[in-house]
Structure formats: C-alpha cells, structure tokens
Amino acid sequence: MRVLITGGAGFIGSNFIRYLINNRPDWQITNFDNLTYAGNLANLDDLRDNDNYRFIKGDISNIDDVRAVLESGFDNVVNFAAESHVDRSLYDPGIFIKTNVLGTQLLLDLAQKTGISKFLQVSTDEVYGSQNVREYADEKSPLLPNSPYAASKASADLVCRSYFKSFDMPVIITRSCNNYGPFQFPEKVIPFFMTRALKDEILPLYGDGLNSRDWIYVEDNCEALLRVLESGDPGQIYNIGSNNELTNLDLTQIILKLLGKPSSLIKFVEDRPAHDRRYGLNFDKIENKLGWLPKIRFIDGIQKTIDWYLANKQWWENIISGEYRKFYEQHYRNLR
Ligand SMILES: NC(=O)c1ccc[n+]([C@@H]2O[C@H](COP(=O)([O-])OP(=O)(O)OC[C@H]3O[C@@H](n4cnc5c(N)ncnc54)[C@H](O)[C@@H]3O)[C@@H](O)[C@H]2O)c1
C-alpha cells in the first residue's frame, strides 16, 4: 500500500505516520509537507532511516509541487495539511482559505486524475459550530462555522463532498474533537499551558473559562483514522469523539495539579471573538458502522502527555524560543 500523507510534519500527521509504521509495517509512506511554522521534521527524527518512509517538501496549494509528488502514484491520500490554529485565523484568514480550501481542492483534482482508491480528508468538530449543553452534533447536523479556521475546514468538507458526488471520487471525511498528546505545537492550549506553567508563567484563560471541549488522546484518533481509511465507505463522514468533555477551567486546574503548580498562575483575559462555547459530538456512527471506540481515559492520556513534555524539554524549548512567541505576546496584548 502506497500512502501519501500531507501535513505529516505536524502534530496529528506525525503521530499518524508513526502509528502506521508500527501497525502497517509493509506500507510505503510519503510525507508531503511544506514545513510552515507548525511543521517540524524533529517530530519524525526516529523514522529518518526507515526504508518505508520518505519526506518530500511541498505545498498542497502549489500545482507544480502537487503534480510532482503525485507522479510516483499512490493508493491512498490522507490530507492533514492545514493552517490549524483558530487564534491565528483571526489575524490572517487568507492563508487559511488558500491552504485549507484551495489546497484541498487542488489535491483532490490532481489525485482524481492519477486515480486513487481513497482520499481521507481530516476535518474537525468545529465545522458544526457551538452546541448547547447536552446537544451533540451528528454527521447530518448543519455546518455553522464561526471562525475563519472553522469556515475554511467546512468549505473544504463541502468541496470534498462535491468531488464524491460529481466525479465519483472515493472521498471520506473525519471530524474529530480536540486532540492532545506528544508533539503538539505549544501554541495549542494543553502544551501552551503546560510549558508556561513549567516556567511559572501566567496562564491566560479566555473569558470565564467555562467554554468546554471534548478531548481525544492523539493515538486514539490515529486508530480511528486508520479504521476509517481501511473500512470506511466513500462519500461518508465519520465523527470521532472521546467522551472527555471538560471546561477550559477544569482542564487548566488538572494540568496545574499534575504539575504541582498553584492555581494563582491562572489569569482570566478577555474572550476571543466568536469563541464557541461548547463542542459536543455524537460519534455513534463510527462505533456502529466500524466498531471503533476510544480507549484512553483523559486522566491517563494527560499524564502520558505531561510525562512526554517533561522528557522532551529540548523539543519544545527550541520552539518557544523562536518566532512563534511574538505572535502570542501581541495577541494577548490585544485582548488584555
Ligand atoms: N489538533 C486538533 O485538535 C485537530 C482536531 C480536529 C481536526 N484537526 C485537523 O487535523 C489536521 C492536522 O492538525 P494538527 O493539529 O496536526 O495541525 P498542525 O498545525 O500541527 O500541522 C499542520 C501541518 O500541515 C503543514 N502544512 C500547512 N500548510 C501546508 C501546505 N500548504 N502544504 C503542505 N503542508 C502544509 C504544516 O507544515 C504542518 O506540518 C488539520 O487538518 C486540522 O484541521 C486537528
């Protein structure tokens, strides 16, 4: 099996590649990534010499790059490549549309011409917008994205649907809740707060801290993605959830407790615009149709994650000492 993974130098993509190497050792994996600020080849250092893995630098929204990589021929494409951070989408929506919408369309278009057996589009629960308490979006719920990031992912989902309907292309979409685990870029809330707390820096918590999210350990998501890739039906959408719903305040307190740091590090800051109050996912379909259920309890996953960040300090120190910090300093000055 020859698989093209786009965005494989990011958080979920790199975990997925490692998951495939361990679980499908005869698969040939090509990682196609243009190494934005969020892409990091250090995430895959251990696989550099693996004969079944290769890296090609390229941009999913560049026709020459995509044409060149597809020339070698693939059975499956899994599209993780994206601008993925909601906060950044408030400042520069254009790059989200370019990568997430136009890039996905270009990949679909050229992959369709070369002929592939499956195209898996990795999407998000954010496309459904905010859910009321005890409401759970299923795959037929309306798309009501509220941030430019969510709108770009919802748009890409619709383009994928149209390629299935119009051109019979074997596209499948997954929509997962928030992921956490090793190699997550420290701008996302869990590693952001962990790495700041370890340095006794304040943790800026949006609004009243009561926005809530369902959290899935990244390895559980990788297992679900592989299940969908191998057994999912073209044209279908599968939600991937974890039944670990937590408010941001509870999440922050758990992190502080496990790190032995005081709650006084929490500082409530002005909420970000259009901050969705709650995501609730109904993921009965993937359980009923594909027999998948999450395995990792939040308390075990978060401890594993903390252990990984403690053991890999150099990995995140290299990132937080770089350019990315400037974005955050300005962002929180704007909110104050
Ligand atoms: N992290 C989550 O909680 C979550 C939840 C649901 C869905 N998703 C989706 O999963 C996917 C991966 O998310 P992540 O958290 O690993 O993101 P990430 O930001 O860590 O990684 C994104 C990767 O895509 C690459 N990339 C960006 N633009 C590119 C382009 N034009 N061409 C080629 N590569 C490009 C980056 O270099 C990076 O390696 C995204 O599509 C995201 O929307 C993420």
Image: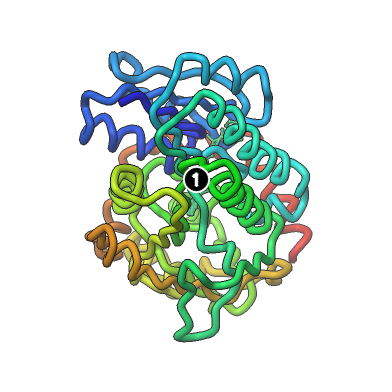
Q: Nearer the viewer, residue 190 or 133?
A: 133
Residue for point 42% across, 43% down: 12
Vertical relation: 123 (above or below) 34: below
Residue for point 60% across, 79% down: 208
Question: What percent of the width, then of the height, locates residue 101?
Answer: 67, 44
Left-right relation of 121 to 272? left
Is residue 55 visible in the rendered structure shown here? yes
Q: Nearer the viewer, residue 295 or 268?
A: 295
Which quadrant does the C terminus fall into? Answer: bottom right
For label 1, the residue is 121
For label 1, the crowd category at 10 Å Cα-Cα, with few meaning under 14, some 14 to 19 and many 20 or more, is many
Quadrant location of residue 268? bottom right
Quadrant location of residue 103? top right
What amino acid is found at the position of numbered circle 1 in the picture?
Answer: Gln
| Element marked by disc 1 | strand
Quadrant location of residue 11? top left
Vertical relation: 276 (above or below) 188: below
Q: Nearer the viewer, residue 202 or 82?
A: 82
Which quadrant does the N terminus fall into? Answer: top left
Residue for point 75% across, 51% down: 330
Question: What percent of the width, then of the height, locates residue 231?
Answer: 29, 48
Residue for point 66% across, 38% down: 99
Question: What percent of the width, then of the height, locates residue 10?
Answer: 48, 37
- Of all residues, the one furthest to the bottom in this rendering is 133
